[in-house]
Amino acid sequence: MESDKFKARFERKRTQPNLYPVLGWICVVVSLLFFPLLIGAAGVVFGYLTKKSGKDVQGVTIMALSVACGLIGTLIGFIAPIH
């Protein structure tokens, strides 16, 4: 039973397209400059979909960095007009 689950997960991970992680990483970078809260939220969604597709560590990393970069981008947006 355990080995069947492992084999199914391995096959799913091997055949899964790399669209979600790529879009997630793009959202992480873009959220620093443009619409940080909206793009950061999209990055969290793509991170969740990446984690759900079997890439656990990469999905959690994308989610965490999306939140962090969204907050940093918001702070940059507040500070930049002052100077």
Image: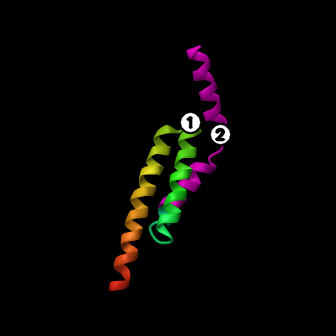
Specify the quadrant that holds the C terminus. Answer: bottom left
Crowdedness near tag 2: few (<14), some (14–19) or many (≥20) residues, C-alpha within 10 Å: some
What's drawn in magenta, residue-wise? 1-28
What is the x, y in percent for residue 60? Answer: 45, 44
Outermost top residue: 1
Residue at the spot x=60%, y=28% of the render? 9
- CA gap between label 2 and label 1 equals 9 Å
Q: Residue at x 61, y 34 (%)?
A: 13
Residue appearing at x 60%, y 49% in the figure: 20
Magenta-span inclusion, residue 4: yes
| Numbered circle sitting on residue 25 | none
Question: How would you classify the magenta stretch by its main secondary structure?
Answer: helix
- For the rendered model, the colour scheme is rainbow
Q: Residues within 10 Å of mark 1 (few under 14, many from 20)?
A: some
Q: Is residue 71 left or right of residue 39?
A: left
**Residue found at the very far bottom of the displayed protein:** 83
In this rendering, position of residue 25 left or right of residue 17: left
- Residue at disc 2, secondary structure: loop
Q: Which residue is mark 2?
A: 16
User: From what the image shows, is residue 60 above or below residue 31?
Assistant: above
Type of amino acid at the residue the image marks with label 1: Gly
Residue 52 location in percent, x, y?
57, 39
Task: Name the kind of residue labelled 2 in the image.
Answer: Gln
Look at the numbered disc 1 and give the secondary structure of its residue: loop
- Mark 1 = which residue? 54
Which quadrant would residue 15 be assigned to in this image? top right
Q: Are marks 2 and 1 in contact (CB under 8 Å)?
A: yes
Residue nearest the observer in this picture, 38 or 68: 38
Confirm whether the magenta stretch covers residue 13: yes
Q: Residue at x 49, y 38 (%)?
A: 56
